[in-house]
Image: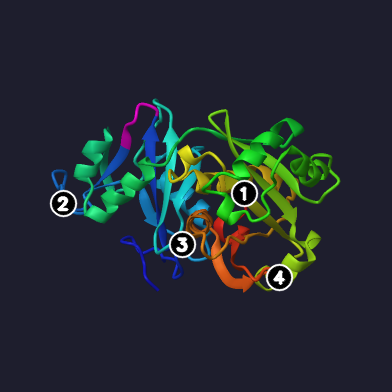
């Protein structure tokens, strides 16, 4: 088994560790200087964001939280996923201006808060600086959710028929009467599906919904094999209707916050979450994967024969005991 520089075992499965890019409200980025080659060393891996390996059996988010606390002494800071795929997870976090950084190990000899441009120049090799760029490009505006109301139905019609959504939403409602017929029972609590409006910085940008998997017999038959029978699974579906925020990491953040703040509050016993974007909807599949889902298998839907990717979020693997 591989070990860290100080002899601790490293998880054999991916991701094997995580980087947490911490930014302050003034735009400064936290960098740590490694002590291994002396105080003046500025070569590869000399300056990095807080980063460290995941231990065997450790969930992804708790491992990143632990490393941030051990390396920088930062506690109680909300981590958000930038990309949880591949061999190394990438998170971004926002810290207050007076964040009390405290180096907690002998691996680092100092820290600095620097402007992004300076951070890109200091961090080497290039692919690690690219990780900083990706993290800092994610919009940091607050995401919130509110139960769908009839006053929101006109927006739902607009969102579902937007040019970037309609190709992936074949049963889009056209007009308020159709929206009322479909979503009225969900608003009134007469359907197992609940729908929420997504807001970014208090501006409505789309909607997201969840349904216990057991309430959808056809979907349950497809997904049960990847969710230990499907009894403790919830399906989600979503649409970012505001095209101006697409491509800025918002979809991944929406999925992450919805799972933690809404789904697990409504269904505390949830073990798995599933989503099924069209296999052609690469952006939606990537948003799920970056939020911690794994693509389990592809399937065809009856009767239209469309092909979809079953994406599965394993709560224990990603969150551990954290809600």
53 on left or right of 208: left
Q: Are marks 2 and 4 in contact (CB under 8 Å)?
A: no
What numbered label is drawn on residue 238? Answer: 1
Distance of label 3 from label 2 (alpha carbons): 27 Å
Distance of label 4 from label 1 (alpha carbons): 21 Å
Q: As drawn, which residue projects farthest toward the left?
A: 40
Residue 112 visible in the current orientation: no
Distance of label 4 from label 3 (alpha carbons): 43 Å
Q: Secondary structure at mark 2?
A: loop
Estimate the x, y position of residue 165 in percent, counting from the top left.
56, 49
Residue 185, picture quadrant: top right
Q: Secondary structure at mark 3?
A: loop
- Which of the two residues, 122 or 33, is positioned nearer the viewer here? 122
In the image, which residues are magenta?
Answer: 25-29
Residue 50 visible in the current orientation: yes
What numbered label is drawn on residue 302? Answer: 4
Distance of label 1 from label 2 (alpha carbons): 44 Å
Which residue sits at x=54%, y=67%? 295
Estimate the x, y position of residue 83 in percent, counting from the top left.
44, 54
Q: Are marks 3 and 2 in contact (CB under 8 Å)?
A: no
Instruction: Between label 2 and label 4, give the one nearer the viewer.
Output: 4
Mark 3 and mark 2 lie on one chain; the one further toward the N terminus is: 2
Tag 3 residue: 55
């Amino acid at each position: 088994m591989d070990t860290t520089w100080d002899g601790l075992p490293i998880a054999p499965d991916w991701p094997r560790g995580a980087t947490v890019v911490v930014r302050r409200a003034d735009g400064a980025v936290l960098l740590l200087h490694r002590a291994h080659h002396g105080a003046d060393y500025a070569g590869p891996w000399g300056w990095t964001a807080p980063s460290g390996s995941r231990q065997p059996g450790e969930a992804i988010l708790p491992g990143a939280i632990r490393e941030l606390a051990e390396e920088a002494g930062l506690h109680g800071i909300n981590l958000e996923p930038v990309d949880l795929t591949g061999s190394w997870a990438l998170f971004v976090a926002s810290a207050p201006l007076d964040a009390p950084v405290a180096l907690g190990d002998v691996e680092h000899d100092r820290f600095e808060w620097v402007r992004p441009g300076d951070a890109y120049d200091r961090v080497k090799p290039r692919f690690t600086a690219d990780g900083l760029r990706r993290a800092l490009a994610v919009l940091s505006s607050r995401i919130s959710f509110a139960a769908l109301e009839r006053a929101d139905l006109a927006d739902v019609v607009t969102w579902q028929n937007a040019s970037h959504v309609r190709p992936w939403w074949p049963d889009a409602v056209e007009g308020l009467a159709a929206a009322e017929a479909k979503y009225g029972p969900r608003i009134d609590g007469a359907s197992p599906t609940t729908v929420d409006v997504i807001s970014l910085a208090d501006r409505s940008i789309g909607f997201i919904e969840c349904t216990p998997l057991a309430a959808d017999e056809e979907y349950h038959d497809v997904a049960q094999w990847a969710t230990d029978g499907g009894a403790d699974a919830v399906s989600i579906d979503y649409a970012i209707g505001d095209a101006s925020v697409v491509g800025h990491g918002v979809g991944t953040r929406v999925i992450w916050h919805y799972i933690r703040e809404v789904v697990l509050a409504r269904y505390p016993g949830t073990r798995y979450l599933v989503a099924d974007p069209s296999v052609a909807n690469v952006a939606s599949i990537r948003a799920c994967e970056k939020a911690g889902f794994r693509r389990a298998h592809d399937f065809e839907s009856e009767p239209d024969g469309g092909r979809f990717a079953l994406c599965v979020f394993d709560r224990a693997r990603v969150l551990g005991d954290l809600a």
